Image (spheres, grey):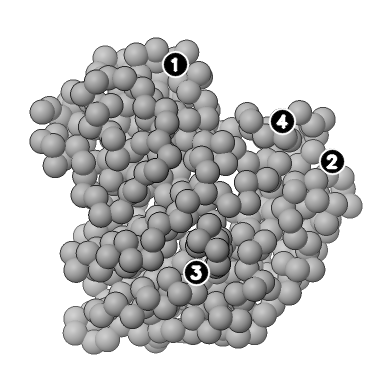
Amino acid sequence: MGKLYAEIYGCTANTADGEIALGILKEAGWEIVDKPEDSDLILLVTCAVKKPTSDRMLHRIKALKIYGKTMIVAGCMASGEGDKVKRIAPEAVLVHPRAITQILEAVESKKDLLTGDCVDKLGKSRVLKNRVVGIIPVSEGCRWGRCGFCIVPFTRGRFVSYSLDKIIDEATRLISNGVMEIWLTSQDMGSYGLDFGRNMLPGLIKSIVSIPREFWVRIGMMNPIYLKPILRELADLYLHPKVYKFLHIPVQSGSDKVLKAMNRGYTVSMFKEMIEYMKNRIENLTISTDIIVGYPGEDEEDFEKTIKLIKELEPDSVNISKFFPRPHTSSERLPQLDPRIIKERSRHITEVVREIAYKKNIRWIGWSGRALVDEIGEGGEAIARNIYYKPIVLRDNCGHILLGRKVEVEVIDAKPYCLIGRLIKILDREILEDG
């Protein structure tokens, strides 16, 4: 066929889309290469959730266009801001996220594929970005779809859950091929199955952890709005030795006024109640959340409430985003805050979050136990994660040798966003469980 160069950006769902596209093209005879200049075809799987990310995508499209190759632009830029892509690269072929399984058709016809509703992404060939991690999309689209800031409901289409049987088959296949981590992902894991008439997330987790072999499961982001009815059952499942004690629930603001303006569907007290319940049930639970700074109408008092909430709950990590209006959202039409105010608030909350993360990580110094090397750092170092999904950097060891290995480590130092560990020994045949 020819040679293919690819870049994949954005969320875990996007990563899975990119892996599927590469798998389909490789199966059709395309050879994957490491440099765009060596290729006949360039594939860019894009993200458009934030304006700075969108701007970066446009910059990459412009930079890659100079090679004069056939270019496929897939992902959320194709469906959400395709007009901007075409202004920069008129010959680029756009592929909707729901049409990624038709990537070969797009390549051969060189025609845009901007629809695709009954997509089924499971059971397809994959080229894994990380041979240790198997990312499984459990649904497409966002069930809530009402948040004032989010472009995703427009770019990803209507909400559809995949069948439980197909997800289990996908997990079994990936695990049989050597994957050691299963990442369950979607635009909102907390809503899985609601289009079938009930929340099926607990049943999904039960089925996944029942698969034989040694592996760990990471449950993806869950919006608070759908969690309360399943919270008790969810906490029970988090106690299973195969489930990472990692909970990603975005709050976005500590102000009820701002949450109402965002149309998030919950209050700060509801969010706090859920977090406290999970923390009380699961010892050393790692908490991750998201904050948007500078949403239209956010005043100083609202921002201070967000700071107060973060200090009170002490999450392990916070994804902080400066607000930028996105196309096809209600907030795009609202009066915007002064960018200088947003910048200063972002700086302040970043400092607060960094201090909290460092304080919490220091408590891990002296911990020792089992972990899985699931990542290679930029310097080639091994990065292991324990059952609490804490990243432990093993500076003196080769990541390429240890990737996918179970190890026993000791935490000897801490930084705000990672732990520093010492390798004690490699565990080849021991059962992977809570250390």
Q: Is mark 1 on a helix, strand or loop?
A: helix
Residue located at (42% from left, 49% from top): 13
Q: What element carries label 3?
A: helix
Q: Residue furthest front?
A: 197
Query: Which of the marked residues, 3 or 4, is nearer the chain's N terminus?
Result: 3
Query: Which of the marked residues, 4 or 1, is nearer the chain's N terminus?
Result: 1
Residue type at tag 1: Lys
Q: Residue 297 carries which label?
A: 2
Q: Which mark is residue 55?
A: none
Q: Where is residue 254 in the image (x, y as percent from the top left)?
A: 78, 58
Q: Position of residue 162 (x, y in %)?
A: 40, 57
Front label number (4 vs 2)? 4
Q: Which residue matches tag 4?
A: 332
- Residue 183 seen in the current view: no
Looking at the image, residue 235 lies above or below residue 352: below
Looking at the image, residue 321 lies above or below residue 234: above
Looking at the image, residue 415 lies above or below residue 156: below
Q: Which residue matches tag 1?
A: 86
| Label 2 environment density (alpha carbons within 10 Å; few <14, some 14–19, many ≥20) | some
Q: Which residue matches tag 3?
A: 201
Q: In which quarter of the image is residue 8?
A: top left
Q: Position of residue 166 (x, y in %)?
A: 32, 61
